[in-house]
Amino acid sequence: MTESRHPAAHRPLRIGVQLAPQHGSYAAYRDAVLRAEDLGVDAIFNWDHFLPLTEPFDAEHFEAWTVLAAMAEQTERVEFGALVNCSSYRNPDLQADMARTVDHISARTTGTGRLIFGTGSGWAQPDYDAYGYDFGTVGSRLDDLAADLPRVRARWDRLNPAPTRRIPILIGGQGERKTLRLVAQHADIWHTFTRLDDLDRKIGVLHEWCAREGRDPAEIELSTGYTVRGFGPLLDGADAASRLYDLGFRLIVPAIDGPDYDLAPLTALLEWRDRVNGL
């Protein structure tokens, strides 16, 4: 699949960063958020886990949604969210209310919120076991997510005050039978950790689901990145980033871990973004 064949290729390129809320102090995390915004990133994400995902597993770690509320106050410009919220951990109506509240917090300077509601079905069994949630199966968790997403939108429509904007939904995952169907039905952004050589085929599957669901794939922004756990296409050079761009990906989100949160890898990506966008 080339850029000319991808219906969302008209979108500008954006560079985000996932700052993993592990292995460091909250002061260091807050500093990293502010530095990332100052560098010029377009979006900042955390993740929704209760325990570190990489060794040492008993190191410092912070909860996602309370951090997002703080990010809403601390930042002025960037969009932000969880990559991704685990729908298993909270009632969907509560999730909607939390997201609406954080949306309003982030709108304090412009009147328009900046939250991206990133969500998924969950996968990290140690989180479930440690906090007493039923892990179920991959299929049951995806079925639960399918039931939750309409409730989230419906609750947003009933809340007073309403969200400041139509909060974009990002769905993370790559499963071809259920996840990509949910993306076609509900997502404004699809974030995938698929390896580079398989991305073309996955995009084709998403387009098939869009056709079945009557959805224009141009409405869905494609997002990917490389996580601290080794998921996703390794962004090890300009060629890899250019290949992602040619496939139609317009949100690139590398992950940076604590305790130091070295943001130096973002510099080349931000310069590339500006060249591509003609800035």
Image (cartoon, rainbow, N blue to C red):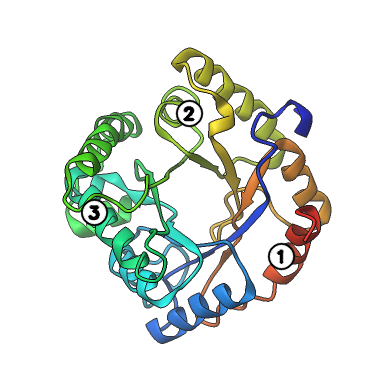
Q: Earlier in the sequence, mark 3 or mark 2?
A: 3
Q: Which residue is mark 2?
A: 180
- Tell me the kind of residue under disc 2: Leu
> On the image, which quarter does residue 248 sit in?
top right
Q: Which residue is mark 3?
A: 129
Q: Residue at x 44, y 36 (%)?
A: 187
Q: Earlier in the sequence, mark 1 or mark 3?
A: 3
Residue closest to the eye, 141 or 203 = 203
Q: Residue at x 45, y 61 (%)?
A: 80
Q: Is residue 2 left or right of residue 101?
A: right
Residue density around tag 3, few if under 14, some if 14–19, many if 20 or more, within 10 Å:
few
Please tell me whether residue 47 is drawn above or below residue 200 in the rendered image: below
Please tell me whether residue 25 is drawn above or below residue 253 in the rendered image: below
Quick one: quadrant of the C terminus?
bottom right
Q: What is the distance, in whole Å, between disc 3 and disc 2 at their CAs?
A: 27 Å
- Tell me the kind of residue under disc 3: Asp
- Tell me the kind of residue under disc 1: Leu
Q: Residue at x 17, y 47 (%)?
A: 159
Residue 250, position as x, y percentages in the image: 65, 46
What is the secondary structure assignment of the residue under circle 2? helix
> On the image, which quarter does residue 92 sit in?
top left
Residue closest to the eye, 35 or 166 = 166
Quick one: quadrant of the N terminus?
top right
Q: Nearer the viewer, mark 3 or mark 2?
A: 2
User: Most extreme residue toward the top, as rendered?
Assistant: 212
Q: What is the distance, in whole Å, between disc 2 and disc 1 at their CAs?
A: 29 Å
Residue 74, position as x, y percentages in the image: 40, 77
Residue 57 visible somewhere in the drawing: yes
Q: Nearer the viewer, mark 2 or mark 1?
A: 1
Disc assigned to residue 270: 1
Residue density around tag 2, few if under 14, some if 14–19, many if 20 or more, within 10 Å:
many
Q: What is the distance, in whole Å, between disc 1 and disc 3 at their CAs?
A: 39 Å
